[in-house]
Structures are given as structure tokens and as C-alpha cells.
Amino acid sequence: SLPDSTPDSNPPYCVFTSAASPSPRPDRGGGGGFSVITTPDEASSALNPLRHALDAPFFAPERLYLPRPYVVKDVPGKGKGAIATRRIEKGKAILVDPVRVLATVGYPSEVRREEVRGLLKEAVERLREPREVLELARKGEGKEEDVGSVVEDVMMTNTFGLTVGGVEYMGLFADLARFNHDCRPNAFIHFSQTTLAMTVWAARDIEEGEEITITYSPAGTPSRERRDMLERVWGFKCQCSLCTASPAEIEASDGNREEIRTLPDKVIELAQKGEFSKALESAGRLFSLAEQEGMSESIEGDMIEVVARLYYLVGDLDKALEWTLKVQHDITGYGVPGELGEQKLKMLQGVIAGLKRELVEKKAREKKE
Ligand SMILES: C[S@@+](CC[C@H](N)C(=O)[O-])C[C@H]1O[C@@H](n2cnc3c(N)ncnc32)[C@H](O)[C@@H]1O
């Protein structure tokens, strides 16, 4: 069960801690537990999915590198970072990291500062390995003798926004917290509401010695907006490979991102006009630009299904099947599918079976001719 404590606060916020982690770390064994800071009201809706998470089977991606394929080292201009210790293949999982602290987004402004710090201190001290959190990067605002202020600083420097059961949280993942931002990242993260773990996936092949990076900001915005957002929300000046590149390269990247923004509508427009081959050409350009900009993850998801249908419409059944299997992988490949995912999977199974049947019939016809 999740023991609770309710320090005097208005509105009352509580710390709920579970000694177990919903997703144990496969390479270290066991989990260090996790703490949730929320109001009892929110807890009544939000804690249900959280309780389920403890019963959820741990999702260990088949393609997870064990032992970890990186070390944490100093990186010029960025503090520490994750450096690949071997070649990492595109599509493989680099890390599965169970959540350590979940805090409802509203609490810092609503609850008095000392109370926030008290809750944060408690949330972290109840974990099996508080040092994993206390030793993370900080902006330097916390005072060593005040553990609550240290945790507050760690949270401000390292948390990601996420949703569980319709409630928004700030989530702290102690291992993921070492991955730096890049405007052209080579990896992406995926959060599972079922296991409450964040998985880092390789977005492209990563060479030994290369830094493994993710994006902290929506990738589609122009460079100036991204940099402003990183300064405002995350509090640092981006020193990534793109932001330190020449003005011409930055301008070219902004141009690509503008085109990436408009291409999905163009693909749909062409498809609606019945110009399926042209639509496929535009989709191809979209994927290639997205790969160049380290944005494949955010773009491909929406368009894969469209491309599968387009291939079907131009009569390329092999490709239609290949892309439909990609849609299926998008649902099952990153963890336990939710309710919506299950519904979609059922629908897809029908489509896949139909395509396979059509392919067999087509091949039989071709043989006859
Ligand atoms: C989640 S932590 C990443 C790991 C951190 N570098 C460390 O030493 O533990 C976020 C902090 O890392 C630094 N950082 C991450 N990405 C950066 C980038 N592209 N340029 C400069 N600093 C970066 C910033 O100080 C930021 O506040």
C-alpha cells in the first residue's frame, strides 16, 4: 500500500511513497521506489493508474542494451552527459528508467515555499537511494544544509512534464536526468503511463564516443524560439551542435523545419485530390528532412498510417504491409499499450490479415499469368 503523510498545508498536499518501483531496473535489479506529491483530491483519480502501475508487468524491450551502452562524463559547456561506450543501432533501447518523484504541476505556486520544500525533502528521503536524486545537477539555488531546497533545485533542473490518468505531473528520472538536450538529438524518450518508466531509444545509429542526446523542447519551432524556451523554462543557454553551428547552418535548419511543418498538410491535400504518387513523394521528403533535423520521432508517428494507405492506393501491397507493421510497432514497440492502443491493435490486426491475404492472391495470379 502507499503510506501517506499530510503536513499542514492549504490546500493539503501529501507525499505518497511506494517502496517498490513499478519497473525494476533490469541491469541493476529491483527498483528504488517512487514518491508522488499530490492533493488527496487528485490522488483519488490519479492514484488509481499509479496503483495499477505497481501491478503492471515490467516492460523490458527486446532490443534493450544490457549492460548500459554509455557512461556519464563531463561534457564541455553542459556539465555531465551520457557518452556512448559502443556503437548503438537505430531503434534499440538505451535505457529504461523508472520514475523516482512525480509531483502535480500546480503545487509550487499554490503551496508556500517551505511547505513545498518539506514535501520534496520527504518525497526523496523516503526513497531507497536518496543520493541518486540529491547528487543530480542543480542551478545552485539550493542550500546544502536545507535538503528541501536542494531537492527543489534538482527538480527545477531535471524534471520532465508528463500525464498520468489525465493529470499532469513533473516527473524526475534519475538516470535520464544525465542526458543533455540537443536541437538535433540522436535519441528520443518515451513515457509509459502503465509502467511509469521513461525509455530512451536511439533515433539513429550512434557511434562509440558520441554524446547521446534528447530534446527538451518541441523540435518543430524555429531556433530562436527553441533557445528562448530553453532559457525561460530550463534556465540554460543551449550549447548544442546546432546552436553552436554557423548562422548559415542554423538558417538552413530553420528552413527545413518550416518545410517539415507544412509538408503533412501538403501530403493530405494531394491525397484528397487523388494524386497518390505525388503525395508519397512529399511524404518521402518529409521523412528525409525530419531525419536530417533529428525530428523523425515527432513526425513519423502521425504520417506512417497515411503512407501505409497511400501505398495501398497506388497498388504497392508489399509497402502497404511494411508501413502498416510500422504502425503496429508504434503501438506495441514502446511498452504496454493502453486501452486506446488495444482498440487500435485489434483494428490493425484485421487490416494486416487482409493485406496478407491480398498479397497471397496477387502472387498466385502473377504465377498463373
Ligand atoms: C537534465 S540535466 C542534464 C544533465 C546535466 N548536464 C548534468 O550534469 O547532470 C539539464 C542541465 O544540463 C545542462 N544542459 C543540458 N543540455 C544542454 C545544452 N544543450 N547546452 C547547455 N547546457 C545543457 C543545463 O545545465 C541543464 O540545466
Image (cartoon, rainbow, N blue to C red):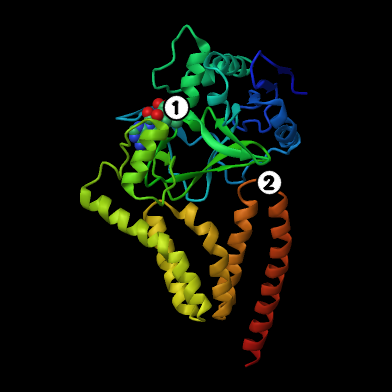
Instruction: Choose the circle earlier in sequence order: 2 or 1.
Output: 1
For the N terminus, the quadrant is top right
Relative vertical location of residue 181 with respect to residue 291 in this rendering, above or below? above
Ligand 1 rendered quadrant:
top left
Numbered badge on residue 157 = 1
Q: Is mark 1 within 8 Å of ligand 1?
A: yes
The residue located at (55%, 17%) in the rendering is 112
Q: Say which of 315 and 15 sits in front.
A: 15
For the C terminus, the quadrant is bottom right
Q: CA distance from mark 2 to mark 1?
A: 29 Å
Left or right for 87, reference 320: left
Using a 10 Å C-alpha cutoff, classify the residue at mark 1 as few (fewer than 14 neighbours), some (14 to 19) or many (20 or more). Answer: many
Which three-letter amino acid code belongs to the residue tagged 1? Thr
The answer to whether any part of residue 81 appears in the image is no
Element under disc 1: helix
Relative vertical location of residue 304 with respect to residue 36 in this rendering, above or below? below
The residue located at (53%, 77%) in the rendering is 272
Element under disc 2: loop
Q: Say which of 311 and 224 sits in front.
A: 224
Relative vertical location of residue 251 with respect to residue 307 in this rendering, above or below? above
Numbered badge on residue 336 = 2
Front of the two marks 2 and 1: 1
The residue located at (50%, 33%) in the rendering is 176
Left or right for 304, reference 33: left
Percent from the top left, x then y, of residue 83?
A: 40, 34
Residue 235 figure quarter? top left
Percent from the top left, x then y, of residue 342?
A: 72, 54
The residue located at (53%, 27%) in the rendering is 174
Question: Please, which residue is most extreme toward the bottom here?
Answer: 369
